[in-house]
């Protein structure tokens, strides 16, 4: 500003000097020997030149100051928009930018709400699936359910062992019966021997009766009665011998039958013992398969639960991240509001200019201060201060009152 | 019976996220898009807690909390302010209006649920 005023003064000085010079030249010309005017007029012309120069210099300086002030005011009024129809451009383009931003913002919001819904649905379904799984398996993976299943297996093993014990007891009873049958077989042998003794006794008796008959014959008439007795004894001995033979025959039949029964019983006993051993091995094998299946199931359940929880945590993280949309929306809305404010001011200024009224200058500092007062996030404040801020603040800052 | 929480936020995604977090923890949820909408949603309803944004169109969160607390039925209903604002001045405004906690977005579900369980009415 001072430089401009110095220049004005310099220009005015030159105007004044030229005017005085012209006046002095006029006076010199008037006072020259060939001139027809006298010194009075020459002095008057010189004084007039000095005063006119001063007056003109003052007018020129005032005119320059006025022109500069008007130019400054014009510059202030048109500062944001003056060159090349920037006002009109801003007036046209700002609403378009505003609509574009709003479209992008609303599309982002709609899509993110859909995304949040989808992730929320995944979260709930996963939660339901894990809950259902926990209920159906008795929470195998936390150890309690595994213990339950193992207890169930142990009870099954115990029940099967009890059943095997019953079968063993039955087998033992059969063995005892077999021993009894063997004893009976031994008795039948004794009976056979006794029947043989009976036959031997009958033979001896027959010999005795024969000797008695011979002796009765030697006795003659006196021995007739004795002969009859001897004959009867012989008949009895013959009958006893026959009975002994019959007993022997029957005892042999019974013995054979008993031995056959013993043989069959022993064969069945062997089969039963083999079946018992096979059953024990089979039951043990089945229980081992079940134990392996339970262990595998437990490992799978643990893995499933861990993976399910990991996915749930990831989905929770995604849901948290989706909150960025709210911050983005606030930043965009605030920017759009300020663009609309600028558009309003430009429109108002254009209207004033159209009516011949000068537009007031825009107070940039006040504008920025008002802009700053509308920020809601720390990123906006950082950006305003000229620090590029891309990340939101620390999450979950909670203050209790 | 599940406890009911009113969520007031102009951002649909935030309503969605807060709703999911609370429903997952077994709470019933009612939501409103701004303070005015929230006042109509009160309607004598039994509320165990309110979670409200601060900057909203039509009626901001601080004004809503003041109006809600002026109603005898909701005088003791605990309020958590959930906002991007973190300035101490705003927090003081919230406290003066009757809020019990101030949570800056974005929130962690576990911490939000912890705050809810500490403040919710029995």
Image (cartoon, coloured by chain):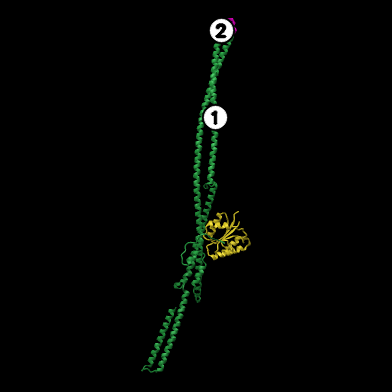
Chain colours: A green, B yellow
Of residue A264 and residue B96, the one placed in the foreground of this image is: B96
Judge whether residue A329 is colored magenta. no
Prevailing secondary structure class for the magenta stretch in the rendered image: helix
Question: Callout 1 environment at 10 Å: few (<14), some (14 to 19), or many (20+)?
Answer: some
Of residue A286 and residue A12, the one placed in the foreground of this image is: A286
Tell me residue B89's x, y (percent). Answer: 54, 66
Which residue is pictured at 55% across the width and 36% down the height? A163
Residue B58 can be seen, yes or no: no
Q: Which one is in front in this view, the residue at disc 1 or the one at disc 2? A: 2
Question: Callout 2 environment at 10 Å: few (<14), some (14 to 19), or many (20+)?
Answer: some
Judge whether residue A216 is colored magenta. yes
Q: Chain of mark 1?
A: A
Tell me residue A188's x, y (percent). Answer: 54, 22
Quickly name the residue at label 2: A215
Q: Which residues are magenta?
A: A213-227
Quickly name the residue at label 1: A174
Residue A377, disc = none
Which residue is pictured at 42% across the width and 90% down the height? A47
Residue A168 can be seen, yes or no: yes
> Of label 1 and label 2, which has the lower sequence position?
1
Distance between the Cα atoms at labels 1 and 2? 60 Å
Where, quadrant-wise, is the C terminus of chain A in this rendering? bottom right
Q: Look at the picture and state if B83 lies above or below A143.
A: below
**Which residue, as the protein is rendered here, is positioned at the far top?**
A221
Tell me residue B102's x, y (percent). Answer: 55, 61
Q: Chain of mark 2?
A: A
Tell me residue A14's x, y (percent). Answer: 40, 84
Q: Residue A198's quadrant in the figure?
A: top right
């Amino acid at each position: 500003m001072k430089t401009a005023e110095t220049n004005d003064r310099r220009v005015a000085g030159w105007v004044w000097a030229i005017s005085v010079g012209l006046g002095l030249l006029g006076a010199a010309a008037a006072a020259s020997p060939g001139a027809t005017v006298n010194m009075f007029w020459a002095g008057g012309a010189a004084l007039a030149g000095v005063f006119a120069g001063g007056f003109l210099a003052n007018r020129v300086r005032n005119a320059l100051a006025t022109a500069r002030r008007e130019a400054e005011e014009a510059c202030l009024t048109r500062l944001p928009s003056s060159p090349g129809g920037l006002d009109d451009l801003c007036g046209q383009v700002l609403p378009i930018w505003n609509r574009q931003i709003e479209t992008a913002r609303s599309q982002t919001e709609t899509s993110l709400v859909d995304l949040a819904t989808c992730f929320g649905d995944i979260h709930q379904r996963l939660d339901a699936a894990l809950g259902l799984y926990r209920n159906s398996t008795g929470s195998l993976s936390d150890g309690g359910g595994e213990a339950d299943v193992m207890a169930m297996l142990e009870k099954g093993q115990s029940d099967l062992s009890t059943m095997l014990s019953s079968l063993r007891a039955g087998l033992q009873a059969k063995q005892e019966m077999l021993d009894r049958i063997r004893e009976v077989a031994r008795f039948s042998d004794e009976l056979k021997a006794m029947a043989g003794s009976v036959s031997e006794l009958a033979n001896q008796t027959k010999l005795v009766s024969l000797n008695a008959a011979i002796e009765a014959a030697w006795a003659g008439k006196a021995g007739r009665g004795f002969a009859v007795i001897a004959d009867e004894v012989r008949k009895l001995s013959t009958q006893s011998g026959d009975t002994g033979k019959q007993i022997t025959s029957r005892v042999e039949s019974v013995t054979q039958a008993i031995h056959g029964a013993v043989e069959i019983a022993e064969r069945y006993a062997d089969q039963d013992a083999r079946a018992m051993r096979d059953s024990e091995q089979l039951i043990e094998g089945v229980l081992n398969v079940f134990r392996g299946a339970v262990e595998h199931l437990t490992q799978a359940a643990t893995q499933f639960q861990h993976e399910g929880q990991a996915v749930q945590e990831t989905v929770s993280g995604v849901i948290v991240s989706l909150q960025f949309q709210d911050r983005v929306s606030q930043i965009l809305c605030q920017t759009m509001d300020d663009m609309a404010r600028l558009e309003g001011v430009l429109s108002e200024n254009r209207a004033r200019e159209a009516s011949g009224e000068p537009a007031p200058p825009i107070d940039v500092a006040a504008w920025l201060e008002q802009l700053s007062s509308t920020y809601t996030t720390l990123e906006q404040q950082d950006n305003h201060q000229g620090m590029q801020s891309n990340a939101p603040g620390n999450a979950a800052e909670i203050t209790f009152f | 019976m599940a406890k009911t929480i009113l969520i007031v936020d102009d951002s649909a995604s935030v309503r969605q996220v807060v709703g999911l977090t609370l429903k997952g923890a077994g709470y019933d949820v009612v939501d409103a898009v701004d303070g005015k909408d929230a006042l109509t949603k009160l309607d004598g309803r039994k509320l165990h807690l309110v979670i409200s944004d601060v900057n909203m169109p039509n009626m901001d969160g601080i004004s809503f909390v003041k109006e809600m607390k002026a109603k005898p039925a909701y005088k003791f209903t605990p309020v958590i302010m959930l906002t991007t604002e973190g300035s101490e001045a705003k927090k003081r405004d919230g406290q003066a209006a009757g809020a019990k906690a101030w949570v800056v977005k974005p929130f962690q579900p576990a911490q939000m649920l912890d705050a809810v369980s500490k403040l919710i009415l029995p």
